[in-house]
Amino acid sequence: MAISIRDVASRAQVAVGTVSNFLNRPDRVAVATRKKIEAAIADLNFVPNASARHLRSGSSRTIGLLVPDITNPFFTEVARGAGDTASENDYTLLLCNSDEDPKKEERHLKVLIEQRICGLLITPSFEGLAGVAELNRRNIPTTFIDRKAESLDQSSVSMDDFHGGKSAIEYLASLGHTSIAWVNGPNSLAQCVNREAGVMNSAKEKNIIISKFQVSQMRSQNGYEVAQKILESNSQITAIFCANDLMALGVLRALLENGKTIPEDYALIGYDDIGFSASASIPLTSIAQPAYKLGALAAQMIINEVEHGKNFKHEQIVFKPELVIRASTQALRK
Amino acid sequence: MAISIRDVASRAQVAVGTVSNFLNRPDRVAVATRKKIEAAIADLNFVPNASARHLRSGSSRTIGLLVPDITNPFFTEVARGAGDTASENDYTLLLCNSDEDPKKEERHLKVLIEQRICGLLITPSFEGLAGVAELNRRNIPTTFIDRKAESLDQSSVSMDDFHGGKSAIEYLASLGHTSIAWVNGPNSLAQCVNREAGVMNSAKEKNIIISKFQVSQMRSQNGYEVAQKILESNSQITAIFCANDLMALGVLRALLENGKTIPEDYALIGYDDIGFSASASIPLTSIAQPAYKLGALAAQMIINEVEHGKNFKHEQIVFKPELVIRASTQALRK
DNA sequence: CGCCATGATTGAATCGTTTCGGTTTAATTG
DNA sequence: CAATTAAACCGAAACGATTCAATCATGGCG
């Protein structure tokens, strides 16, 4: 039924080995033979069988990407970047979504091993280290995304969260704000911890009062609730900085509902610069992370590692996030 | 290097065929033997090689999902649904994003054929029929998502767009609106055509005046621009219905910037009910589509088809969308 | 004209499974 | 106790590619 390299060979009147060479190292086959094989392939509508190729050659050319939440636009962009880079290099990307569920994560990891992926891209959740260790044992290269690798024999592509936190506060300070609310996620996420360190650092330098609000999940609803607390607190706060855009959008909604105007009554900054922030009712100032680039570069790095084998130099690349100024912030008027 | 079924067999003192039976039809192997094999597998840390299995057995247990835009929350949900169902049934989902680019779509289709997927889930863009024909020729089952299959020997899971358009207008009519702006996407999308038919149908019934605005892309920015036109037009319009939420969010932003209040000055309805609509500055009334369910059901159907082979009855399932009422609409006050 | 280097081509062995006809073992029956 | 049957198990062949040592052609050179 299925058409194999053998059929192509017999129709083109050459040996199977020659067809294989044509497929993988065309320069080694004479131009006349090339033509014959091309014709045979076209006639028979032949498409090579990836499984057979993989089985014999030992290298799978598929790389796994395991993200904790595919509905988060940040990860969607990461996936797009990784996917594009993968297919440009003739790799296949196997995208798995763990929904922040360790069970699903474990299952996906199992499948990825069955598929004999040649490399893994992963944004580790705080717990997920067990399954990753298994990958290591099997010598499957792994690179972290959005989380710096602590070990030097592993690559990672991450963001300078300290700088992100710091620059948001510096910017607000430059606008004249001196009392700022800081809405952060759980300490179990390295990102949150580092951003807060940056916040506190520049607050100290600029002599700013930080009111900290911490939530367990970084969803829109959580931002909404925090904003109500801020309004009730009757404090001097004139600016609000949220650890992600989802929460900032929640804050925005709460403030508008309570008759506040942005940026006059409160300046508001988010983090991530997801697409929806630009088209919010008040376009959001945000700390932009180059998600697409993160994914693309991580894919490129793991491909390099796969292809250059042992003599590969691991790198921990750290991007600087960028402040994107929109309508939700302005200079403080006394 | 790699551990194979053969190593397991020799360590467990059984034949390779027995190990294979243990893996695939455990009931056929005696309980004592089972224990031995289990132990050997655990000791050796054996994980079967999917490629070898596929090569020999001929069936791949991976299903492809090809979406036109992974950054659209609607498709993210579809992907989540399909992915969950796939892994519950021990299938692997290969998610590909074509970015609405026919070239990428073609390339992905090629890869999917190389991988010998056992079935394809696809939301066809208006052009993409060429590549799909190739799949048909190879007898790879294909089911459409969010687009009804015109042929009876193909399955599909789609939405009743006519009903969606109709019910939005009926709802607005019931609130007392008689002059409504309808912001639609290009006619090349079946969805848009059908929604419009529904709109026009109920407009006629309820004696409503529809002002139609058509855009080529259904992005937020397009909605923003249309809203400005509406404001300039100085018409009697009191309600705006957009063919997706992204555009509705753009409309919302434009209206608020121009000092209008929602829902007092204008009632506003979107379509899709993406997550961000609920947390917009004015939570959006919208026509909800069960994206997760669409993906999950489509996956289930293709799995059934794959497993039941020829005697499988193709179905064209059509869901009814649901009106979700939020703050952006209210009864008209004279 | 014979020799050799080079480039093209060949085809058998192999990758890790599943499949399936055949063999062994144990239990049942008359 | 011999004959019959069913349950377990065995192991060689096959899936469709790649690999690589071996063979074949070709042309340049002394």
Image (cartoon, coloured by chain):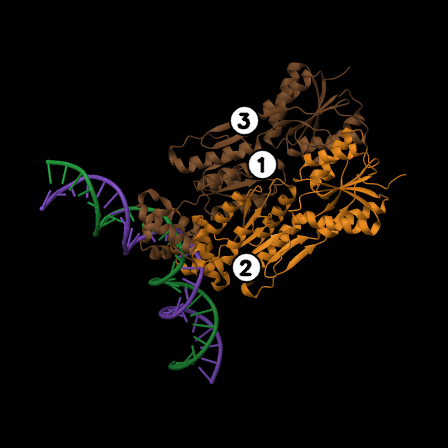
Chain colours: A brown, B orange, C purple, D green
Frontmost residue, A220 versus B323? B323
**Badge 1 is on which residue?**
A77
Q: Residue furthest right?
A: B334
Apparent side of residue A278 relative to residue A33 in the rendered image (left or right) = right
Cα separation between marks 2 and 1: 32 Å
Choose mark 1 or mark 3, whichever is in front.
Answer: 1
Q: Quadrant of residue A203?
A: top right
Task: Identify which amino acid the numbered label 2 is placed on.
Answer: Val
Badge 3 density bin: few <14, some 14–19, many ≥20, Cα 10 Å: some
Q: Quadrant of the C terminus of chain B?
A: top right
Q: Secondary structure at mark 2?
A: helix
Q: Judge whether A259 appears above or below B3 on screen.
A: above
Examine the rendering and report whether any part of residue A102 can be seen: yes
Q: Position of residue A97 (x, y in %)?
A: 58, 43
Task: Identify which amino acid the numbered label 3 is placed on.
Answer: Phe
Badge 2 density bin: few <14, some 14–19, many ≥20, Cα 10 Å: some
Q: Quadrant of residue A2?
A: bottom left
**Which chain is home to disc 1?**
A
Task: Identify which amino acid the numbered label 1 is placed on.
Answer: Glu
Q: Position of residue B145 (x, y in %)?
A: 62, 51
Q: Residue at x 58, y 50 (%)?
A: B122
Q: Position of residue B100 (x, y in %)?
A: 58, 42
Please tell me which of labels 1 and 3 falls first in the chain. Answer: 1
Label number found at residue B306: 2
Residues at marks 1 and 3, common chain?
yes
**Badge 3 is on which residue?**
A319
